[in-house]
Image (cartoon, rainbow, N blue to C red):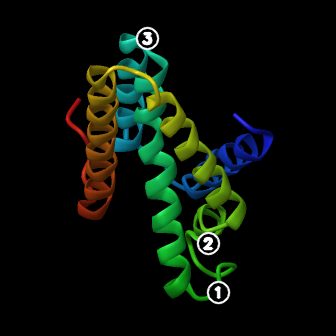
Amino acid sequence: MSSTLGAFTTRAEQSDKRRWTDVDDRSETASDEVESALEAAQLASGEYGIAVAAVLPCFWIYQVVGTELLDTAGDLEKHPYGDWIGMYANPVFAEETKIVRGIVDRAAEGVLELQRQRMRDAFVQASRYEWMFWDAAWRMETWPI
């Protein structure tokens, strides 16, 4: 992970903590469950290509959503999610996402079709987890587990 990406991750965590400062009873969120599921999938597979393919949707989807929201967010200083939007709409994060996409592409080169299929499956499943995260937030739901 590059130092730039590490800085983005740290800012995201700090922004999330600030958002919940005034909330007394924060229940476990879908985000926590998605993170746990992705970590378990990556550890279980033990295969580099599958692991990087499973991580890519988080980068790519957040970058696209951040960029799309930037067009309608208005003044980010006044927006409740301005830090988040600014972070993921940042051209530097877009470049980091492009790098991760390249890493996945290179990992898929020269491997058997079965391995590429497993990488695709991991990418699709992780994308579904991302969709579930966004959908749960939209519906203001928590996960029962």
Residue 61 located left or right of residue 94: left
Disc 1 or 3, which lies upstream in sequence?
A: 3
Q: The residue under label 3 is which amino acid type?
A: Gly
Position in image of residue 135 (x %, y %): 26, 57
Nearer the viewer's eye, disc 1 or disc 3? 3
Residue annotated with mark 1: 75
Residue annotated with mark 2: 82
Above or below residue 16? Residue 46 is above
Residue 3 located left or right of residue 5: right
Residue closer to the observer: 52 or 106: 106
Dot 3: element: loop
Q: Which residue lies furthest to the left in this view?
A: 144
Residue 10 located left or right of residue 57: right
Q: Spatial distance from mark 1 to mark 3, Cα to Cα? A: 44 Å
Dot 2: element: helix
- Residues at discs 1 and 3 in contact (Cβ within 8 Å): no
Q: The residue under label 2 is which amino acid type?
A: Gly
Task: Mark yes or no: residue 47 visible.
Answer: yes
- Residues at discs 1 and 2 in contact (Cβ within 8 Å): yes
- Residues at discs 2 and 3 in contact (Cβ within 8 Å): no
For residue 46, the mark is 3
Position in image of residue 51 (x %, y %): 45, 25
Disc 2 or 3, which lies upstream in sequence?
A: 3
Disc 1 or 2, which lies upstream in sequence?
A: 1
Where residue 139 sits, quadrant-wise, is: bottom left
The residue shown at (34%, 48%) is 130
Q: Spatial distance from mark 1 to mark 2, Cα to Cα? A: 8 Å
Position in image of residue 13 (x %, y %): 63, 45
Task: Mark yes or no: residue 25 visible.
Answer: no
The residue shown at (26%, 37%) is 125
